[in-house]
């Protein structure tokens, strides 16, 4: 059963940091053979944020964390674990999480990165909730942060129009009153499709050489259409099964917070499940696909705008490289 047992876990606060620089579809028209109309029609994206040259993933993560801790009214020293969901760490080691833990002076906390494609966000949230429910942690800072712009091939129109940079964070903790609890999660993977979204260069399989650079292995490569089909085919039945298993009828869910990859995927999945489109938070038009950051950012903006209200049932869903996918249900 994907239901959480043990101590109730609550969401105490959220925060985001989006880099200042805006790259519009019209800017991209000057870089590759594309058009604002094509990008909007096929993806729903109008613009995305790009980190400054001196900004690292850890910098974005830190800024989102400070806001989330302030929102939660929890000091850094009360954090037991820092989990950073990212596919674009500053370096393979050290991880982003220890850097953020150090910069925050969260002196009692452990720290680790979670990397599982764009689903890292949901994986990290589920792991944080598991650790709190079991009693080993009281408060966990969970961050999704990406600087994808450094991994994108800006000459490849198939990928460069999709991605953006950004960070979001959430503070989860042992519930103070038993209300507003994380209810259930399900984490899945279909590793037979590991070749659909890749970044292969520079590590064990393909150590960096001039040949790996020439072959484009130091950039994101993606079979976009196959990813599109995978998401549309896999998510509706996965989500329907999940709702049935946790005894939460689909129409009881107030908000669907999807990974912000492509509006047509969100729309297609919701339509197949007969869910009204007004029940989803969408911000991919202004940020593009920020991978592990996207659901944190959408959740934060949904709460800040007053759309998502305390007590609402929220289902957060993601999918990504691996191919991994997952969902987490909670009452905010
Ligand atoms: N501008 C203009 N034309 C483009 C383009 C762009 N930026 N990118 C691709 N095209 C072209 C293709 O070259 C192709 O041309 P061709 O028919 O002459 O070969 C045509 O558009 C159709 O390509 P296709 O890949 O079939 O389009 P699509 O409808 O599947 O849309 C994506 C492409 C990438 C937008 C879509 O497949 C998608 O969003 N996939 C999911 C990607 C994703 O979410 N990845 C992250 C997961 S975490």
Image (spheres, rainbow, N blue to C red):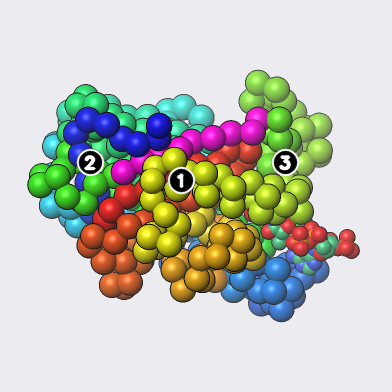
> What residue appears at the point 64 percent right and 25 percent down from the top-left corner?
203
Q: Is residue 326 left or right of residue 113?
A: right
The span shown in magenta is 183-191
Specify whether tag 3 is near ligand 1 (CB below 8 Å).
no
Q: Is residue 273 above or below residue 140?
A: below
Q: Is residue 272 visible?
A: yes
Mark 1 residue crowding within 10 angstroms, few (<14) / some (14–19) / many (20+): few
Residue under label 2: 9
Q: Nearer the viewer, mark 1 or mark 3?
A: 1
Q: Is residue 196 left or right of residue 55?
A: right
Residue 201 placement (x, y as % from top left): 69, 32
Q: Is residue 316 left or right of residue 119?
A: left
Residue 28 lies in the magenta-colored region: no
Distance from Cα at disc 3 to Cα at disc 2: 35 Å
The chief SS type of the magenta part is strand
- 153 or 307: nearer the viewer: 307
Q: Secondary structure at mark 2?
A: strand
Q: Is residue 148 above or below residue 104?
A: below
Residue 6 placement (x, y as % from top left): 22, 30
Distance from Cα at disc 1 to Cα at disc 2: 22 Å
Residue 114 placement (x, y as % from top left): 45, 33
> What residue appears at the point 81 percent right and 38 percent down from the top-left corner?
215
Q: Is residue 28 visible?
A: no
Mark 2 residue crowding within 10 angstroms, few (<14) / some (14–19) / many (20+): many
Q: Secondary structure at mark 3?
A: loop
**Contact? badges 1 and 2 (CB < 8 Å):** no
Q: Is residue 57 above or below residue 213?
A: below
Label whose residue precedes the other's in the sequence (1 or 2): 2
> What residue appears at the point 59 percent right and 66 percent down from the top-left corner?
271
Distance from Cα at disc 1 to Cα at disc 3: 29 Å
Q: Which mark is residue 196?
A: 3
């Amino acid at each position: 059963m994907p239901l959480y047992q043990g101590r109730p876990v609550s969401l105490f606060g959220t925060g985001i940091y989006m880099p200042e620089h805006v790259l519009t579809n019209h800017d991209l028209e000057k870089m590759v053979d594309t058009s604002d109309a094509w990008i909007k029609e096929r993806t729903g994206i109008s613009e995305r944020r790009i980190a400054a040259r001196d900004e690292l993933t850890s910098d974005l993560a830190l800024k989102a964390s400070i806001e989330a801790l302030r929102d939660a009214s929890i000091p850094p020293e009360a954090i037991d674990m820092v989990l950073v969901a990212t596919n674009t760490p500053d370096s393979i080691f050290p991880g982003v999480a220890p850097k953020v833990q150090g910069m925050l002076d969260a002196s009692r906390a452990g720290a680790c990165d979670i990397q599982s494609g764009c689903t890292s966000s949901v994986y990290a949230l589920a792991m944080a909730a598991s650790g709190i429910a079991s009693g080993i942690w009281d408060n966990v800072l969970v961050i999704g942060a990406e600087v994808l712009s450094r991994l994108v091939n800006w000459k490849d129109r198939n990928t460069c129009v999709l991605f953006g940079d950004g960070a979001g964070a959430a503070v989860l903790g042992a519930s103070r009153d038993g209300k507003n609890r994380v209810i259930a999660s399900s984490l899945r993977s279909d590793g037979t499709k590991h070749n659909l979204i890749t970044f292969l260069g520079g590590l064990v399989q393909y150590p960096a050489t001039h040949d790996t650079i020439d072959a484009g292995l130091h950039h994101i490569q993606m079979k976009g259409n196959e990813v599109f089909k995978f998401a549309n085919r896999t998510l509706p039945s996965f989500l329907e099964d999940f709702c049935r298993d946790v005894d939460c009828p689909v129409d009881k869910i107030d908000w669907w917070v999807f990974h912000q990859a492509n509006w047509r995927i969100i729309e297609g999945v919701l339509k197949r499940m007969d869910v009204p489109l007004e029940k989803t938070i969408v911000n991919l038009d202004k940020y593009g696909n920020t991978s592990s950051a996207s659901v944190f950012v959408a959740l934060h903006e949904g709460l800040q705008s007053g759309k998502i209200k305390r007590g609402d049932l929220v289902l957060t869903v993601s999918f990504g490289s691996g191919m991994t996918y997952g969902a987490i249900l909670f009452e905010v």
